[in-house]
Image (tube, rainbow, N blue to C red):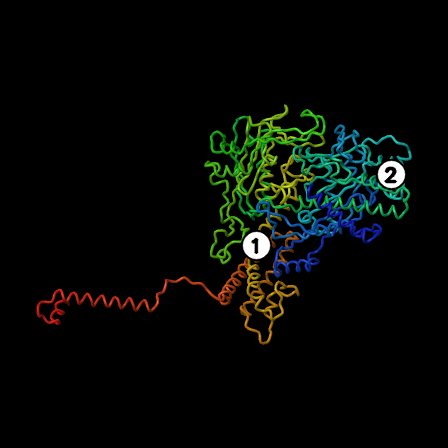
């Protein structure tokens, strides 16, 4: 919610500034009637420019990847609730101007990736009969769920403390109608609908009429029964509050997906998201740290916006209700509503369609081994046995692995069960990772847990990261050789690397296609603390080394065995985990471990202590993550995110190396080529401003010019390689956009070869040029003596020899013996 609110503020500020300067907007006119996939050739010029900037310009370099996101408006053409009309063209322009790109972040390093998504928005209205089909399906799926009385903090007009009939709508029962809606939108303009399901992401924004869906229509007079509320009448100054209330129906409904959650939004099994502005208002989230909690004002409501605009006019300008004033109020109201809707769409894109990468070691794994080990301290149940009521379906996990990795990969899942007391190092590791924490809880209404106010609550947690570390260090047969078994030569390089690596002299970190091993440990504990969960509030933790899932046979507040309090409250009721059904948590852990997929309600934030910001609005739907879901399989959208993460990881390795090579050129230009060539009128730091590269500017044929430090044939060869790389990067962006897996792999392999060739070529000649251009050198040699000292030493040695000979002669000479005879005797 922090991200959403900040984006909403920015969107509203820019939109109101633009519309205030441009005056009254033109009347509503919808030009785009159906979905149409934009051909990449229409984007080639823009992508080519951004790719050229990546290759030639200095500073921060990002590789542009186009992606198309469709926003389908249902019931916003005057055929839905309140007969409200929303300008799809303006909404598309608002999104394009204020959120044109998305650059995911690697959570482990905290740095943004080198790839940046250029978002192409396609906002269009659905067919006229779509809203009626959805209303019919939703009405048929409504199940009474008692009464709901919002507390006084829920300041939503029409629900201020009133007891309201509540209905639950099972989303899986209406999902087929939404499938048909999205399918028909694709089918109108595309023949390859099956591929569109995989490559195109859609957000369905729905505005059904609660009056037409009301399961218990109220008794009203004939005038109200015959007349539907029309926003146009309201905009003309006819403020019929009674008709406005009747349109809302005095009831509320919320969506559950497979029996879990209570939301206005949900993630479908296919690749789309549903946002219903007529549902709710809903209120759910954590009770201890309300960051990201969903409140009744999280999603905009048309009824509240209509009433607030009318109230502002009647209170502040009761005498100025002319047509110009009403038109201004209408434009301002619609601008505010579009801004809030745009903020919601951006949050959905940020969390579900283009999320951050939670694990950076994402590989194109061709062979995967998953040892699934159940470790328990009891004999009450065995979730790996086929007859167990909470049996873990290994075959279904196997299917999800194939969906994550692709059809060309081979995955093997082996399972076994063990007793915890037979593996003491693991029992010690489990004990070391457990801790208790006192937390503040805000209670707003009288409950069995206390009266309204601030209360202290002690919870027991397992430190997930510490548990993985302890398992990796434990000297046990179940962990030795399994945890952290991704060898050095299997890991993807994300760092700068050394010169030897880029020259091919060191091959230890070269990516191999060996078997990757991701062990899964399922800890089944009896007599554990009743509130025991992992420190992330869930039952699973996973990274690129291992996945650890927690199953407890305890209970809280007299509930059934296996129920653990999640610390969440939905519509005033506490939410619990059934820890016995551990399969979906294992699937979630494997998705994070293998493909770096984060939970849909989490995103990276550099300003948080743990670098995670929550938005629980996206926690409901076809996802195995979180306390508001109840499915063991992944959606098509999640599989698409997995494939993109795999591509991003491969491209990231390539781009890091390519940026390092280009940085060598930048550094050489800045250090040697700029000052000596001032006579060419090239100002320092202005390379590339005129559209030319530094090579073009420095190596023109100028008569009388001094020979450049690099030969022209060397620079021509570098230009050819750089031009080839630029062309291949454009083709890579095209393959990304079309979802062509094989083409992405071919382009990546080709670019890797070109990058190595460019580095060797540039490094060799730049090193030679540096040697020639340096002014002086420092060398270390043995100390040298002067010639004067040498002559003195030789003279002393000669004198010593002479003295020795003279003394010897005097010592052995006999009386009157000739000197020649003495010399002959001595030698």
Q: Earlier in the sequence, mark 1 or mark 2?
A: 2
Q: Is residue 53 left or right of residue 235?
A: left
Q: Nearer the viewer, mark 1 or mark 2?
A: 1
Residue 158 has which mark? none
Q: Is residue 23 visible?
A: yes
Q: Residue furthest left?
A: 815
Residue 621 can be seen, yes or no:
no
SS class of the residue under badge 2?
A: loop
- To which quarter of the image does residue 564 belong? top right
Q: Are marks 1 and 2 in contact (CB under 8 Å)?
A: no
Disc 2 crowd rating (10 Å Cα; few below 14, some 14-19, many 20+) is some
Q: Residue at x 70, y 56 (%)?
A: 39
- The residue indicated by pointer 2 is 228
- Residue 281 position (above or below residue 508): above
Q: Position of residue 314 (x, y in %)?
A: 87, 40
- The residue closer to the viewer here, 496 or 257, is 496
Q: Nearer the viewer, residue 125 or 141?
A: 125
Number of marks: 2
Which image quadrant: the N terminus?
Answer: top right
Give how far across and how far down residue 430 sits, in percent.
52, 33
Relative to the observer, which residue lies in front, 548 or 135?
548
> For residue 656, which numbered disc appears in the image?
1
Alpha-carbon neighbours of circle 1 within 10 Å: few (<14), some, or many (≥20)?
A: some
Give the x, y percent position of residue 678: 60, 69
């Amino acid at each position: 919610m922090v991200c959403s609110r900040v984006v909403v503020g920015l969107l509203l500020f820019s939109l109101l500034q633009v519309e205030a300067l441009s005056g009254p907007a033109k009347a509503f006119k919808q030009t785009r009637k159906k979905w149409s996939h934009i051909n990449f050739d229409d984007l080639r010029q823009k992508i080519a420019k951004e790719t050229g900037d990546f290759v030639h310009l200095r500073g921060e370099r990002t590789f542009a990847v186009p992606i198309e996101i469709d926003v389908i408006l249902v019931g916003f053409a005057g055929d839905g609730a309140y007969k409200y009309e929303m300008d799809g063209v303006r909404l598309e322009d608002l999104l394009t101007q204020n959120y044109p790109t998305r650059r995911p972040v690697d959570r482990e390093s905290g740095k943004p990736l080198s790839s940046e998504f250029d978002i192409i928005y396609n906002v269009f209205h659905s067919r006229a009969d779509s809203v009626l089909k959805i209303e019919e399906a939703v009405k048929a799926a409504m199940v009474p769920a008692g009464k709901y009385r919002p507390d006084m903090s829920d300041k939503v007009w029409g629900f201020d403390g009133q007891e309201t009939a509540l209905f639950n709508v099972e989303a899986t029962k209406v999902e087929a109608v939404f499938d048909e809606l999205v399918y028909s939108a694709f089918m109108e303009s595309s023949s390859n609908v099956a591929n569109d399901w995989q490559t195109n992401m859609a957000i369905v924004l729905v505005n059904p009429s609660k009056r037409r869906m009301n399961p218990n229509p109220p008794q009203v007079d004939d005038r109200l029964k015959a007349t539907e509320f029309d926003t146009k009448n309201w905009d003309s100054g006819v403020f019929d509050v009674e008709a406005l209330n009747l349109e809302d129906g005095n009831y509320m409904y919320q969506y559950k997906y497979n029996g879990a959650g209570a939301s206005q939004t949900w993630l479908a099994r296919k690749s789309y998201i549903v946002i219903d502005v007529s549902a709710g208002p809903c209120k759910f989230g954590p009770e201890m740290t309300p960051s990201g909690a969903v409140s009744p004002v999280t999603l905009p409501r048309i009824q509240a916006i209509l009433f607030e605009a009318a109230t502002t006019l009647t209170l502040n300008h009761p005498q100025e209700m002319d047509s110009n004033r009403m038109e201004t109020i209408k434009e301002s109201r619609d601008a505010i509503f579009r801004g809030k809707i745009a903020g919601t769409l951006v949050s959905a894109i940020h969390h579900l369609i283009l999320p951050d990468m939670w694990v950076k070691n994402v590989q194109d794994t061709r062979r995967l081994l998953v040892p699934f080990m159940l470790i328990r301290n009891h004999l009450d149940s065995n979730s790996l046995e086929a007859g167990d009521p909470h049996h873990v379906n290994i075959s279904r996990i196997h299917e999800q692995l194939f969906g994550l990795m692709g059809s060309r990969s081979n995955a093997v899942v082996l399972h076994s069960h063990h007793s915890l007391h037979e593996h003491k190092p693991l029992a010690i590791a489990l004990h070391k990772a457990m801790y208790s924490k006192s937390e503040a809880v805000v209670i707003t209404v009288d409950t069995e847990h206390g009266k309204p106010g601030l209360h202290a609550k002690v919870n027991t947690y397992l430190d997930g990261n510490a548990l993985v570390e302890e398992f990796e260090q434990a000297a046990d047969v179940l962990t030795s050789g399994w945890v952290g078994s991704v060898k050095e030569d299997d890991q993807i390089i994300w760092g700068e690397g050394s010169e030897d690596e880029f020259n091919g002299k060191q091959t230890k970190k070269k990516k191999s296609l060996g078997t990757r091993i991701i062990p899964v440990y399922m800890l089944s504990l009896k007599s554990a603390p009743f509130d025991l969960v992992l420190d992330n509030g869930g039952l699973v933790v996973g990274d690129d080394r291992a996945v650890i899932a927690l199953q407890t046979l305890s209970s809280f507040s007299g509930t059934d065995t296996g129920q653990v309090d999640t610390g969440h409250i939905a519509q005033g009721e506490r939410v619990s985990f059934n820890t016995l059904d551990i399969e979906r948590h294992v699937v979630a852990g494997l998705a994070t471990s293998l493909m770096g997929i984060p939970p849909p309600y989490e995103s990276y934030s550099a300003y948080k202590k743990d670098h995670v910001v929550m938005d629980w609005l996206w926690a409901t739907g076809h996802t195995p993550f979180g306390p508001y879901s109840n499915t063991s399989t992944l959606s098509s959208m999640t599989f698409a995110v997995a494939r993109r993460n795999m591509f991003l990881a491969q491209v990231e390795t390539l781009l890091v190396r390519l940026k390092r090579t280009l940085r060598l050129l930048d550094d050489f230009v800045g250090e040697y080529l700029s000052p000596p060539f001032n006579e060419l009128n090239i100002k320092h730091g202005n390379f590339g401003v005129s559209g030319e590269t530094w090579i073009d500017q420095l190596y023109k044929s100028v008569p009388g010019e001094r020979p450049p430090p690099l030969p022209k044939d060397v620079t021509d060869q570098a230009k050819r390689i750089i031009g080839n790389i630029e062309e291949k990067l454009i083709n890579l962006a095209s393959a990304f956009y079309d979802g062509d897996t094989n083409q992405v792999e071919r382009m990546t392999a080709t670019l890797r070869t070109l990058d190595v060739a460019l580095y060797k070529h540039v490094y060799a000649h730049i090193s030679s040029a540096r040697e020639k251009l340096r002014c002086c050198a420092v060398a270390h040699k043995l100390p040298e003596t002067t010639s004067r000292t040498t002559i003195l030493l030789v003279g002393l040695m000669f004198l010593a020899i002479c003295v020795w000979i003279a003394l010897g002669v005097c010592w052995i000479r006999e009386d009157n013996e000739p000197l020649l005879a003495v010399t002959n005797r001595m030698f």
